[in-house]
Image (cartoon, rainbow, N blue to C red):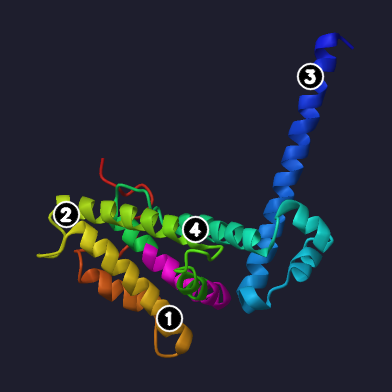
Amino acid sequence: MTKTETARTPPRRARGEYAKTRKTRKAIMEAAFEVFADGGYRAGSLREIAQRVGMSEAGLLHHFANKSALLEAVLEHRDDKARELVPIESDDGEAVLRGLVRLASYNASIPGVVELFCTLSAEATSPDHPAHAYFLRRYEYTRRNLSNAFASLEAEDRLAPGMTPDRAAVMLIAMMDGLQVQWLLDREVVDMAEALQVLVAGFADIDWEEPEPGSESV
């Protein structure tokens, strides 16, 4: 073995350890997502999460300093899942809004996570809450991208008279959050996806039919 090969061995091992750590953290987040979705943040214990990934609670705390740190990671993980349904940064405003309706429909299948989000977003208005910074970032990011989506519709003369992109973004977020609360209180009365579609239709002219793959004009 040459000196060059010997020198390169530690970085390869380091990369392997990093990949293993990243895989373990992802497994912990997915387990925490399931636990918090099933019973909420308060009822979900670190011990139960650790058991789901086959490690001790001490081992879990090696990757996440405390339950609050794990909570923020889970919320970010939830946003990753949401971005799979909503092309939030797309220049196609119509596609963004269709995605939000898909997301509302998906959220109806994970009531525990919806409850977790609603509870935490209210609690996190306190500056000393562990999720305060996360929600500040999240709302700013969502407002900015929804405003861009509505701006693209405005450029196509598809925004309702008297509506502005910024105003539409703020109102839509408020409506989505409010629908989630009403749905949690009575799931038989509120259909989040249907109600959201009706509300969005009041803001802009939207074609709700998903385009067939390859059907876009060229």
Residue to which mark 1 is pinned: 181
> Residue 213 appears at what percent x and percent y?
38, 51
Instruction: Using residue 47 as the reference point, say whether residue 106 is left or right of it.
Output: left
Q: Earlier in the sequence, mark 4 or mark 2?
A: 4
* Residue at disc 3, secondary structure: helix
Q: CA distance from mark 2 to mark 3?
A: 55 Å
Residue ID at (60%, 57%): 73
Q: CA distance from mark 4 to mark 1?
A: 20 Å
Q: Amino acid at mark 1?
A: Val
Magenta span: 100-116
Q: Label 4 neighbourhood size at 10 Å, few (<14), some (14-19), many (20+)?
A: some
Of tags 4 and 2, the one toward the viewer is 4
Instruction: Using residue 46 as the reference point, say whether residue 153 is left or right of it.
Output: left
Q: Earlier in the sequence, mark 1 or mark 2?
A: 2
Q: Is residue 11 shown above or below 128?
A: above
Q: CA distance from mark 3 to mark 4?
A: 39 Å
> Residue 116 appears at what percent x and percent y?
55, 73
Q: Label 3 neighbourhood size at 10 Å, few (<14), some (14-19), many (20+)?
A: few
Q: Amino acid at mark 2?
A: Glu
The answer to whether residue 167 is visible is yes
> Residue 133 appears at what percent x and percent y?
48, 57
Q: Amino acid at mark 3?
A: Arg
Residue to which mark 2 is pinned: 154
Q: CA distance from mark 3 to mark 1?
A: 55 Å
Residue to which mark 4 is pinned: 134
Residue to which mark 3 is pinned: 8
Q: Earlier in the sequence, mark 3 or mark 1?
A: 3
Residue ID at (39%, 85%): 190
